[in-house]
Amino acid sequence: MPKHPTTLIGSATLAAIAAARSIAEASICTDVNAMALRPDEACGTLVDVLGSMLALLPESERTPPKRRTTLQTVVKKLKRHVACAAADPTVQAFRAHVFSASPSKLN
């Protein structure tokens, strides 16, 4: 399985990079010089955007069977991407640093 960053950058579109940059910029807390990532909020917003984009598909692509197939494809890709990212050493190190670090280690 390829490493997450290589896969992410290799297959990312400009829209995906712009979305990630927007999430990162919106997460910056200038008064404390930190970034407060809110995964639940970001995922919810991305699902809203995805739903809106899928609604723009031509009428022929929005029949129940085609919609089901499209959603199954999205779910499969998302599961693969999450598994690949979770296995990536950089992501693991970041999670360990952020979620297990005591306040004194962060300074």
Image (cartoon, grey):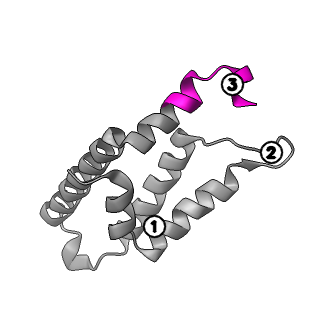
Would you say the magenta stretch is mainly helix, strand or loop?
helix
User: Marks 1 and 2: in contact by CB < 8 Å?
Assistant: no
Q: Secondary structure at mark 3?
A: helix
Query: Residue 69 location in percent, x, y?
Result: 15, 60
Label 2 or label 1, whichever comes before in sequence order: 1
Which region shows up in magenta?
Answer: 96-107
Q: Residue at x 68, y 58 (%)?
A: 25
**Residue projecting furthest to the right:** 31
User: Marks 2 and 3: in contact by CB < 8 Å?
Assistant: no
73, 107: nearer the viewer = 107
| Distance CA(mark 2)–CA(mark 1) | 25 Å
Q: As shown in the figure, which amino acid type bears the numbered disc 3?
A: Lys
| Distance CA(mark 1)–CA(mark 3) | 32 Å
The disc label shown at residue 33, or none: 2
| Distance CA(mark 3)–CA(mark 2) | 16 Å
Disc 2 or disc 1, which is closer to the eye? 2
